[in-house]
């Protein structure tokens, strides 16, 4: 039986950054990653905004492989709108290298990392999660902990161990498919987004260049539509129509919970972070920066709770409160905007695109696009400036 102050289940950015912050505070931390290598497999479109990234790391060409300086939207009828994102640059990452960098930071801070280690069940003492049972390299082990952090992604089991409700309604689960493709001869410093019921119902398609005519080409659709046709069918049709001469270098798929957050993220001896807590942006599905923001809070609260000798749910609710102040409240408001946008018809999107192109180029901003999309929802228009400010979108 091994003992740690904090055991983190999941070695992605959310888990490893939580481990880094907690270890820096002086507690003994273990990260369990079920795959044999940190950063593999990649289930991500890999795009982040520069401002959010710089809160945590300075971009490094080893993993920030392509700088994005422009955005193009395509309406269902093919109308293109070039969006002004002055002051809002971003990067497309190499997630394998990026995840390893976050793990390196955790290791340098003193956290121990086990790869090929699956958390298969909880250790429960007195009705409280007090550790995990682990399968590692064919052996069964038990690891006791004062606190267990569930950073095990959208399919998280850790929350269910403590009786937390982490399921996602079908309509809020974005089901995604993506190719890594070569032969994509587009502006390498621009991302491309495509809308329409025939392209990606309840979601959108994307092309995120990674340099050298290589790009992530993918799409996400609402789980309601995935029951009729899986995302791979939509992706195949999308690629055949728009990039018939491109070639596939890799493929990945997965789900993104865009629910605006789970109701409870803590229990006695346990808390959730990242996709396990549905912390992705409900509008665009972006999860990397929100996960790091949540992990920064989670690591601090975890260490404080351990050092105080109190890892009860009551003590850990400080994590929920701090998350609520930083992004939780705005994500719930953004969820309402997402629902309104996803109800738009193809004709609505076409109309918005035409209206946008009537504006001077400097006025074609993301904020203006949201405003046009929400004209029928005055209450949401009132909340929009607060949301744009919180997520860093210039009006």
Image (cartoon, grey):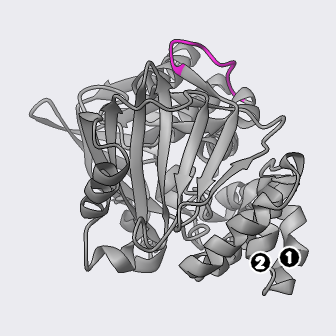
Which residue occupies the foreground of this view, 305 or 319? 319
Q: Circle 1: is it few (<14), some (14-19), or many (20+) Cα within 10 Å?
A: some
Q: Which residues are magenta?
A: 56-64
Task: In this rendered view, identify the residue nearer to me: 286 or 87.
Answer: 87
Residue 381 numbered mark, or none: 1
Numbered disc 2: secondary structure: loop
Q: Residue at x 64, y 79 (%)?
A: 348
Q: Secondary structure at mark 1?
A: helix
* Residue at point 81%, 52% (across, down): 365
Image position, residue 356 (x, y; %): 77, 62
Alpha-carbon neighbours of circle 2 within 10 Å: few (<14), some, or many (≥20)?
A: some
Which is nearer the N-term, disc 2 or disc 1? Answer: 2
**In percent of the image, x 69 and y 54: which residue is there?**
319
Q: Which label is found at residue 34?
A: none
Q: Position of residue 2 (x, y in %)?
A: 33, 32
Q: Is residue 72 above or below residue 176?
A: above
How far apart marks 2 and 1 lie (CA) works out to 6 Å
Pointer 2: what residue? 374
* Side (left or right) of 190 relative to 374: left
């Amino acid at each position: 039986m091994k003992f740690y102050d904090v055991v983190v289940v999941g070695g992605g950015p959310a888990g490893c950054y939580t481990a880094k912050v907690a270890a820096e505070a002086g507690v003994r931390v273990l990260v369990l990653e079920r795959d044999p290598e940190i950063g593999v497999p990649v289930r991500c479109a890999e795009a982040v905004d520069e401002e959010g990234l710089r809160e945590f790391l300075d971009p490094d060409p080893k993993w920030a492989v392509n700088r994005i300086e422009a955005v193009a939207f395509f309406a269902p009828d093919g109308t293109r709108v070039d969006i002004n994102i002055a002051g809002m640059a971003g990067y497309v990452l190499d997630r394998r290298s990026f995840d390893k960098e976050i793990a390196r930071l955790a290791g340098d801070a003193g956290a121990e990392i086990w790869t090929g280690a699956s958390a298969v069940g909880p250790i429960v003492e007195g009705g409280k999660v007090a550790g995990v049972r682990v399968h590692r390299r064919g052996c069964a082990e038990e690891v006791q902990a004062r606190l267990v952090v569930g950073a095990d992604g959208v399919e998280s089991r850790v929350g269910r161990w403590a009786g937390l409700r982490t399921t996602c309604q079908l309509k809020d689960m974005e089901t995604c498919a993506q190719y890594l493709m070569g032969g994509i001869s587009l502006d390498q410093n621009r991302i491309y987004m495509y809308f329409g019921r025939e392209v990606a119902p309840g979601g959108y398609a994307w092309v995120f260049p990674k340099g050298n005519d290589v790009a992530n080409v993918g799409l996400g659709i609402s789980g309601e539509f995935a029951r009729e046709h899986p995302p791979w069918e939509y992706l195949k049709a999308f690629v055949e129509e728009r990039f018939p001469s491109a070639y596939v270098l890799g493929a990945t798929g997965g789900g993104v919970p865009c629910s605006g957050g789970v109701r409870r993220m803590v229990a006695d001896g346990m808390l959730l972070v990242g996709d396990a807590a549905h912390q992705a942006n409900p509008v665009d599905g972006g999860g990397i920066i929100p996960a790091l923001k949540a992990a920064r809070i989670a690591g601090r609260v975890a260490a404080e709770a351990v050092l105080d000798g109190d890892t009860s749910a009551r003590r850990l609710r400080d994590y929920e409160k701090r998350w609520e102040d930083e992004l939780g409240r705005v994500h719930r408001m953004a969820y309402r905007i997402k629902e309104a946008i996803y109800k738009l018809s193809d004709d609505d999107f076409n109309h918005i695109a035409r209206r946008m192109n009537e504006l001077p180029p400097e006025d074609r901003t993301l904020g203006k696009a949201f405003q046009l999309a929400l004209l029928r929802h005055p209450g949401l228009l009132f909340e929009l400036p607060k949301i744009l400010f919180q997520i860093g979108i210039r009006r």
